[in-house]
């Protein structure tokens, strides 16, 4: 019996998922990277399944392990592109809905938005993976290198070529209430760094060597996650935030799709329709009686309101004495000397109950290809134009400044796309009032994207600006989601996507300036840069034994 057992072949060596990914062929590694990235999109709104990142990021670390051993930084960058392409394709597919609004003109370009944009954004992820691969180390410290490199690539994505920080990895935590409170310390980019670290750290559990070394990074990540949760629970008070005295807001959500807006009949009926919705009985009854501020969404009018005096007369008849209208509206300036074309702006306008204009803010951060055409001289020759039907597209406004509205604290206006940029909530030196903003106002039109994840993602990013700055957020969206949120991001009132109606609310008072707001005003995302430098130094500092174990 002993002789028979000795003659048996040794049992096959079992390999776990980590080693299988490291040893996979280039084709299978690319497929695994694409799948891991696509799975990560489930961590974004409206799904919010952020634990899936405990699969996506460890898999990315193991894939880079194998890539570095076989092909170096270039092979890691290729895997990064596939990972990013999967993530952005699965997370941004809904952009295709905008190409269907005017399908006769833009349907041909749908693959450029649905496939071309994710492919381009994936270059940033490729840079992050490639940089990590160039600096790769064995052991736990590669987690720090991966975190620093990928979070740096995310910062670049948010800034290069005007930036596009949509669905930053930090939104995995930024869409909730408790974990999102960390944004008041370091903002979105810092939250992104922490999300990557926490979810990548378990990759070391599949390493060889001493148990203590394998557990070090997961234990550290657990402590960080627990710290974020504890901070969030501590920061959010049990009681409601006090309200500003003498302010009663009404937000009107008309729910007009883009096809209807393009009809000539809507031009004549727009003010009448808006007035009917605005004047309907609210939750506490009374219509517009007692409303101090009526708020309409972005680009509410299919015409230039300054050039349409009858519309201003209709507004004056609609508003009770003392009520102020804040609305999105396109406007036009006279041509500059030597030019013939009017200059158009996407603006927020403030009108009193007599229809007189009180204040204006012109959108400063425009949407490329949506509101203006980059390299327009060249692209116009190819027959391209921006989505909005404005001759030559919109012009960018000047430096961000406060919008002064009677009865409200200084307003930091955010028109649509501006709300996804953390720094946009801050006001520039052009703010002639020395007092800081006391309110974030986001007017938007997400009708372009229908009932897709897009409006939910936009809403979550807008909400995070309130937490970052410690300011209430008032949001008026054409088709939804409209809401009033307190400085902790808690919803006080909300209208869901795809309905017409109004919400009535008071205005929560702002908090004291947050740590993030104070630091950003002086030095940008300082805590993010301090943390990324510490991670980079920690990942690159090698003991003698670790230096011998460096991957080649």
Image (cartoon, grey):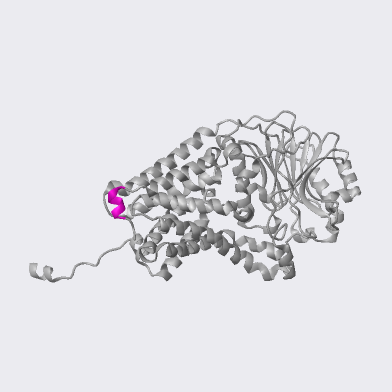
Left or right of residue 270: residue 496: left
Residue 253 pos. (x, y %): 74, 48
Left or right of residue 338: residue 541: left
Identify the image quadrant of the N terminus.
Answer: bottom left
Magenta: main secondary structure equals: helix
Identity of the residue drawn at 52% across and 48% down: 170
Give the image quarter of residue 510.
Answer: top right
Give the image quarter of residue 58.
Answer: bottom left
The answer to if 195 sits in the magenta stretch is no
Q: Is residue 66 visible?
A: yes
Left or right of residue 78: residue 314: right
Q: Is residue 496 visible?
A: no
Identity of the residue drawn at 59% across and 59% down: 92
Residue 425 pos. (x, y %): 65, 42
Give the image quarter of residue 70.
Answer: bottom left
The answer to if 548 sits in the magenta stretch is yes
Q: Which residues are magenta?
A: 543-549
Identity of the residue drawn at 49% across and 64% down: 82
> Between 365 and 466, which is closer to the camera in this rendering?
365
Residue 68 pos. (x, y %): 38, 62
> Between 511 and 229, which is closer to the camera in this rendering?
511
User: Which residue appears farthest toward the front when viewing the image?
Assistant: 338
Left or right of residue 222: residue 479: right
Identity of the residue drawn at 78% across and 40% down: 294
Identify the image quadrant of the C terminus.
Answer: bottom left
Judge whether 460 appears above or below 249 on screen. below
Residue 377 pos. (x, y %): 74, 65
């Amino acid at each position: 019996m002993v002789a028979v057992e000795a003659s048996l072949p040794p049992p096959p060596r079992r390999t776990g998922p980590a080693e299988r990914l490291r040893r996979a062929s280039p084709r299978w590694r690319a497929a695994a990277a694409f799948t891991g990235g696509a799975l990560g999109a489930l961590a974004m709104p409206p799904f919010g399944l952020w634990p899936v990142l405990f699969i996506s990021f460890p898999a990315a670390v193991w894939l880079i392990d194998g890539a570095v051993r076989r092909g170096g930084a270039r092979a890691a960058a290729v895997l990064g592109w596939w990972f990013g392409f999967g993530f952005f394709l699965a997370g941004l597919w809904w952009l295709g809905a905008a190409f269907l609004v005017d399908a006769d003109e833009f349907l041909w370009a749908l693959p450029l938005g649905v496939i071309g944009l994710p492919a381009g954004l994936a270059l940033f992820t490729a840079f992050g993976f490639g940089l990590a691969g160039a600096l790769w180390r064995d052991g736990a410290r590669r987690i720090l290198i991966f975190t620093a490199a990928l979070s740096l690539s995310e910062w670049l994505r948010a800034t290069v070529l005007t930036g596009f920080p949509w669905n930053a990895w930090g939104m995995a935590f930024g869409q909730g209430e408790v974990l999102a409170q960390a944004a008041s310390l370091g903002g979105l980019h810092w939250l992104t760094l922490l999300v990557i670290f926490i979810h990548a750290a378990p990759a070391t559990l599949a390493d060889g060597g001493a148990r203590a070394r394998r557990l070090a990074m997961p234990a550290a990540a657990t402590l960080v996650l627990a710290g974020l949760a504890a901070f969030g629970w501590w920061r959010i008070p049990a009681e409601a935030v006090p309200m500003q005295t003498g302010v009663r807001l009404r937000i009107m959500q008309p729910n007009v799709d883009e096809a209807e807006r393009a009809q000539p009949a809507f031009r004549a009926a727009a003010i009448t329709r808006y007035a009917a919705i605005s004047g309907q009985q609210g939750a506490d009854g009374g219509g517009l009686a007692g409303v101090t501020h009526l708020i309409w969404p972005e680009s509410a009018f299919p015409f230039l309101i300054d050039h349409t005096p009858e519309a201003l007369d209709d507004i004056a008849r609609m508003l009770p004495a003392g009520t102020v209208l804040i609305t999105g509206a396109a406007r036009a300036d006279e041509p500059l000397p030597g030019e013939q074309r009017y200059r158009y702006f996407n603006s927020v306008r403030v009108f009193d109950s007599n229809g007189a204009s009180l204040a204006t803010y012109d959108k400063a951060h425009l949407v490329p290809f949506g509101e203006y055409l980059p390299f327009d001289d060249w692209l116009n020759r190819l027959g391209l134009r921006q989505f909005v039907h404005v001759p030559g597209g919109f012009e960018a406004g000047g430096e961000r400044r406060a919008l002064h509205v009677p009865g409200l604290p200084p307003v930091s206006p955010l028109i649509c796309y501006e709300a996804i940029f953390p720094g946009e909530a801050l006001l520039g030196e052009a703010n002639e009032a020395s007092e800081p903003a006391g309110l974030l106002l986001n007017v938007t039109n997400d009708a372009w994207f229908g009932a897709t994840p897009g409006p939910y993602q936009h809403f979550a990013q807008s909400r995070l600006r309130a937490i970052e700055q410690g300011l209430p957020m008032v949001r008026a969206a054409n088709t939804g989601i409209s809401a009033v949120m307190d400085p902790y991001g808690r919803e006080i009132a909300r209208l869901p996507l795809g309905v017409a109606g109004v919400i009535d609310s008071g205005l929560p008072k702002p908090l004291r300036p947050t740590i993030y707001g104070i630091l950003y005003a002086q030095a940008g995302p300082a805590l993010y840069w301090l943390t990324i430098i510490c991670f980079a130094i920690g990942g690159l500092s090698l003991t003698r034994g670790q230096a011998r174990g460096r991957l080649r």
